[in-house]
Image: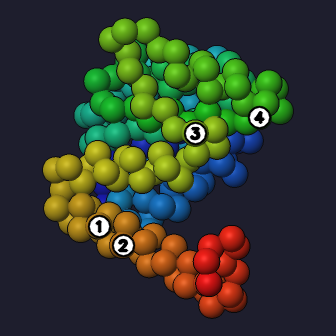
Amino acid sequence: MSKPVVGIIMGSQSDLPVMKEAAEVLEELGVPFEVTIVSAHRTPTRLASYASEARKRGLRVIIAGAGGAAHLPGMIASGTSLPVIGVPVRSSNSIDGWDSVLSILQMPAGVPVATVALNGARNAGILAAQILGSQDKNVARKLDQFKLSLEKKVLQAAADLEKKGWKGTREK
């Protein structure tokens, strides 16, 4: 496998069911990635090393998922100049996920974190690929094909629904 260019990190093993969606879409798009656990609160030394060494190791984007207080994305962003995409995770210690969303959204000036929807790891993977695709024609081509497949899927669903004759209040 090629050297990873996207790092997918999470604060806890319990975040994996959400974060694996980022890995799955990157795999579909042929983007090499790595996945690991880096806890902002329980492994601060590991966090600092991961952030400061990411670029030297060849990473170009980091996706960081966290629940509860959700400090991981912001702390990673404070230690690297790479783009960081935050995934707020609804966790067992979360207030319906809002604490995670707000923790990741409310970053101070100078430490941006691009933030996707609650449990939106799939979109984080797509966004990471789009960042890479701005400079990599192969990734861009795969993204273009991916977007076309989304269009075809919706158009097929619309055609299937319309075949059933459900026209609602539209004139017949």
**Can residue 124 be seen?**
yes
- Helix, strand or loop under label 1: helix
Label 3 amino acid? Ala
Q: Earlier in the sequence, mark 4 or mark 1?
A: 4
3D distance between C-alphas at marks 4 and 3: 14 Å
Label 2 amino acid? Leu
Give me the disc on residue 89.
none
3D distance between C-alphas at marks 1 and 3: 22 Å
Q: Which residue is mark 3?
A: 117
Residue depicted at x 34% and y 40%: 61
Residue nearest the observer in this picture, 146 or 138: 146
* Label 3 neighbour load within 10 Å: few <14, some 14-19, many 20+: some
Q: Which residue is mark 4?
A: 91
**Can residue 157 be seen?**
no
User: Left of 54 or right of it: where is 45?
Assistant: right
3D distance between C-alphas at marks 2 and 1: 6 Å
Q: Earlier in the sequence, mark 2 or mark 3?
A: 3
Q: Earlier in the sequence, mark 1 or mark 3?
A: 3
